[in-house]
Image (spheres, rainbow, N blue to C red):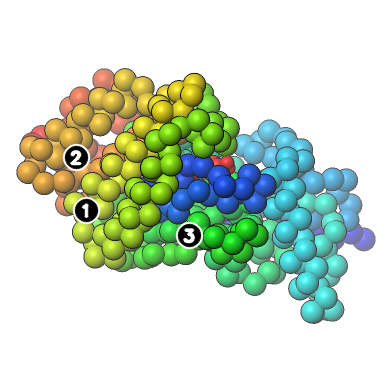
Amino acid sequence: MSEIYYATSTGPVNIATLKYWGKRDKDLNLPTNSSISVTLDQANLRTLTTASCSSKFDNDQLWINGATYPLDGARSKQVLADLRSLRKEVENENSSLPKIATFPLHIVSENNFPTAAGLASSAAGFAALISAVARLYKLPTDASELSKIARKGSGSACRSLFGGYVAWEMGDLANGEDSKAVQVADKKHWPDMKAAILVVSDMKKDVPSTSGMQLTVHTSDLFQHRIKEVVPKRFIEMKKAIIEKDFPTFAELTMKDSNSFHSVCLDSYPPIFYLNDTSKRIIKLINLLNESAGKIIAAYTFDAGPNAVIYYEEKNEKYVLGLLHQFFSHLGGWESSSFDPKNAVIP
Ligand code: 2P0
């Protein structure tokens, strides 16, 4: 009789506050700069994945939100090959374990947010896949070690193996062994931190990240300044701001880095536009809000799409969401959030 072995895990979404944009090695997914992100609460945004394997399955297969995909992309194949080779080591060390490293895998995933709309679906997806297979294979689960495998699936996925505040250290070795994610601080370190996601559009993005970032690497002059002068300094300053829970500094660096990332996109040739008019209105509003508050109480950031993520501290929620509601209530969607506009305080 052929057994079916299975395990389930989740992968959270992370939103970069210091952006990864550019690869120095496409095959190993090695970045041109280090990055930092905040992992979002899994209650709202996550991928749930069950990995199963059996000798009676015909081939590796993937289901995402009910649709079937062959698991034959180069990135997925690399990730599964790495996990299988770790399982073989475990089987060799422990001869009582069932020999499942060569069995075909079935991966069933479900996202509770729009796929490929600039909400880091590939990060959550690869993190959930790797966690589920690591559990199925009973692999030693050091998150930084697994992050090196996740990185090969999708760069930003390496940061989703941790909660809280996460740094992806770019490393400098050619084989990528030192390009891994580490936790800067856990979620409990800064419990007041909140993130609001403003879904400006749930359409698939115009230019996929992987090709967009390579266009920037090859054509933008500004990009060299960003990776050599701007980001290394910001990486140190942002980690310090997180450790010291210094919101104004964290927020200013976050907004500046979003601006810098979208600037190198615009400086690519042909230019890449991820922000739309609504995104730009959100930027203006957050600046107005901070000006009227007399200090920085909210930060915007945008990834490879027009959707905004706004970071703020819980004590300022009524100000921040109140202002956004005042300007964008006609766009709908507020009924799905826990925010009650009746309690809003407009500054
Ligand atoms: C980030 N983004 O740091 C940046 C900010 C988008 C803008 O990581 O080619 O899907 O799979 O390594 O991780 C999106 O890029 O790209 C991304 P690949 P990925 O979150």
**Left or right: 185 in relation to 104:** left
Give percent across and percent down for residue 186.
38, 65
* Neighbours of disc 3 within 10 Å: few (<14), some (14-19), many (20+): some
Q: Residue at x 48, y 59 (%)?
A: 169
Q: Residue at x 66, y 64 (%)?
A: 135
Quarter of the figure with residue 290: top left
Dots 2 and 1: beta carbons under 8 Å?
no
The numbered disc on residue 178 is none
Which badge, 3 or 1, is on the more N-terminal residue?
A: 3
Front one among 342 and 77: 77
Real-space CA distance between mark 3 and mark 1, rounded to the nearest whole angstrom: 21 Å
Which residue is the site of mark 2?
320
Front one among 338 and 31: 31
Mark 3 is on which residue type? Glu
Is 34 rendered above or below residue 120?
below
Real-space CA distance between mark 2 and mark 1, rounded to the nearest whole angstrom: 18 Å
* Extreme residue toward the right, this view: 1
Which residue is the site of mark 3?
169
Real-space CA distance between mark 3 and mark 2, rounded to the nearest whole angstrom: 32 Å
The numbered disc on residue 249 is 1
Dots 3 and 1: beta carbons under 8 Å?
no
Nearest-to-viewer mark from 2 and 1 = 1
Ligand 1 neighbours mark 2 (CB distance < 8 Å): no
Dots 3 and 2: beta carbons under 8 Å?
no
